[in-house]
Image (cartoon, rainbow, N blue to C red):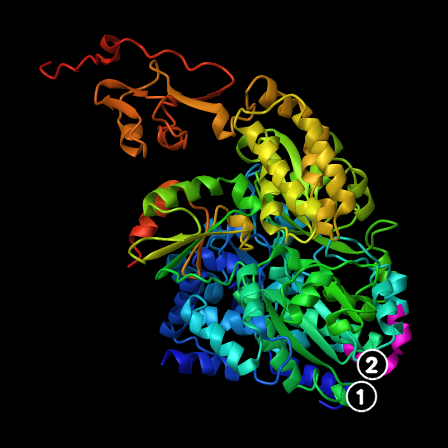
Amino acid sequence: MTMDRIDNIINKYINEEGVLIQLLLDIQREFNWIPKEAITRINERLKIPVSQIFRVASFYTALSLKPRGRHLIRVCLGTACYVRGGPRILDSVERTLNTKAGNTTSDGKFTLETVNCLGCCALGPVVEIDGQYHGGLSSANIAKMLASCN
Amino acid sequence: MKSASDLEKLRKDILAKRDPNRPAVAVCVSTGCEALGVKGVLKAFEEEIRKQGLEGKIGIKETGCLGFCEKGPRVVIYPEEIYYFRVKSTDVQEIVSKTLINKEIVERLLYTDPITAQKARHLSEVPFYKYQNRLLLDNNAKIDPKKIEDYIALGGYTALAKAIFQMTPEQVVEEVKKANLRGRGGGGFPTYRKWESTRDAPGEPKYVIVNCDEGDPGAFMNRALMEGNPHSILEGLVIGAFAIGSHEGFVYVRQEYPLAVENMDLAIKEAEKYGLLGKDILGSGFDFKVRIHRGAGAFVSGESSALMTAIEGKVGEPRPKYVHTSEKGIWDKPSALNNVETWANIPFIINNGAEWFGSIGTAASKGTKIFSLVGKVNNTGLVEVPFGISLRDIIFKIGGGIRNGKKLKAVQTGGPSGGVIPEQYLDSPVDFDVLTKLGSIMGSGGMVVMDEDTCMVDVARYFVNFLCDESCGKCLPCREGLKQARKILNDIATGKGKEGDIEKLQEIADVTSVASLCALGQTAANPMLTTIRHFRNEYEAHIKEKKCPALVCRGLVSYFIDPKKCNACTICFRNCPANAITGEKMKIHMIDQSKCTKCGTCYDVCPPTFRAVQKISGEPVPLPIPEEERLIKRVAKDKSD
């Protein structure tokens, strides 16, 4: 089952050059992380060395070698969000979820990450919850938003 | 399409089918407005128009970003071009009934000038737009980025037809040279020189690349262009490819911009369908294909040589540039890379000529530049201005001044590679060379306004921390030097700064700037150096007096509750995450300094009418008042009278 999903993604990139990053981004989107099976499968089918796949997967922040939670919370710490209180929002989320940025809560519900800029600078501070952007936040309303995630 | 006249015929056909007087509503669906809930507004319009049986009579258009995201969601009513801001789904029924049908204005949704209280119906009356010259951004409000017909209707791809049928590749390069177009990605390198050397370099195939790896935190002009008008970038790219003799191109977009990826992907497919991309473009015999490459989140990959290795599917690290990428780029083939904004300028230059382009801007910097004006300024958003405008005009005339009546301290330009420019230089005209002289850079156009509540040590620490995380680690001075600089800045910010720290930072800055391969390391010192140069006193206050004058650095501030102002409302007591506040109703609250984590929650939640929570730095916290004085005696109203 998992292998079929991996193979379907790899099939899109057969006989093309320079596809590793695109392929890994697709795997990331499908599984929410890069499972070990995917790495070995890419190695088998595209003959890309495992070391090279690991190097790429560990270099880019969008690719995760650890499983992520059901909800992905990304707190923007770009300059505009930073000067408008982004770090305070992060503090508040860290307290509410009882986990530090870069980690997943023990119940597997939330993964908390920081991001360098989401390009919504006029609305800072911004937090992205499961792909949805939320602007102009305060420490008070972020807790409510987290509570409404199932 | 097989010829330039086919394109012209298509344009006329599209226009003939359109009634310019038909009422229509254009809703901005870009990322900014989406974050503010525009999807609901759009749905409400669709439902309302259906409900009133006006389908076909009133058009709905989804458009791109006009940059004033702060006041979103934004809708425009055509044909009168009335702009409504902060529209909610509950306003929709009124807009349809009043404005679209009866041509009446809904006054409360118009832009109101905060100073003169005047209402503005049209964009040209809004101060934020009045002083701009929106060459590139203007079409974002007129075009549905998902429909190529909209772009063609406005004369899109006529520049391409002109270039390939009426000009030689050499003439195209010559025109760009005469226009003196300089790269909008940061360096300001003359575009024609990149094109020329790629064209003249031996080796086939040659590649052309759009750089939309807008990694600068605080900047989003490339996102707005690519989301709102992807065809203008494509058209520029194809013209460039024709001039260079390239038949294959890449659009590199960061994956943090999913909508930009989606719209560009669609734009490529549509252009192929119409014969504007692919084999035998417009019947000219010229072939050109484009692929999208999504970036996977690495700031350093925006650097040209790093971006090219990323396109090859490898780790995006820079390499030495004694061999230029225009000679050996992607797969060691000649490659020309330009920023999104640079490409979007090309169709204008070809259509209107170099002379016209040269009439905008200063002697050395021609045309317009889009800035991302953000931070502590009243009007935040995208600002497109001709080169030569002063920073003061951007911040005060367009930006409407500093928020909450605070004082301006500095403006940071150019992202992490740039520097801070203090108040006294605000009258300097903005162009590539002037900003460099001030110790900062133009960069891709980030402009973060900082007020008196911004700590300059903290700003330097923020950027050094950012660059430290984003350094790829290839060059030792950047990898290790920045780490040391971060440690020193962290020490200064937490009260552990020592005499000599400033000099040590300067020394690290000297080495990193000369001994790093790429611009990330070479310019990494700018935030440190400019803050030290202009705000040395703030560094010294942190080091010598253990004081953060702007009351920002956590390790140097303390919170206490002024017993004279506290009304024992228990709000701070209930909100304190560290349980550091004692008190109850009728009993003045106090902060236990040993438990306080200095998160500032109490300061934020204390009702503005009391303002009892105080933030101090560099002075001792007043001693707690005796227990018996903590009880508040309120005289109860005698209800028996």
Q: Which of the 4 quarters of the picture holds residue B44?
A: bottom left
Q: Nearer the viewer, residue B70 or B237?
A: B237
**Majority secondary structure in the magenta region:** helix
Question: For mark 2, does the 10 Å Cα neighbourhood hold few (<14), some (14 to 19), or many (20 or more) residues?
Answer: many
Q: Nearer the viewer, residue B635 or B188?
A: B188
Q: Say the numbered circle drawn on residue B164.
A: 2
Q: Amino acid at mark 2?
A: Ile
Q: Is residue A53 magenta?
A: no
Q: Position of residue B263 (x, y in %)?
A: 57, 71
Q: Secondary structure at mark 1?
A: loop
Q: How many marks?
A: 2
* Stretch of the chain drawn in magenta: B159-173
Q: Position of residue B521 (x, y in %)?
A: 71, 47
Question: For mark 1, does the 10 Å Cα neighbourhood hold few (<14), some (14 to 19), or many (20 or more) residues?
Answer: some
Q: Say the numbered circle drawn on residue B284.
A: 1
Say which chain tag 1 marks.
B
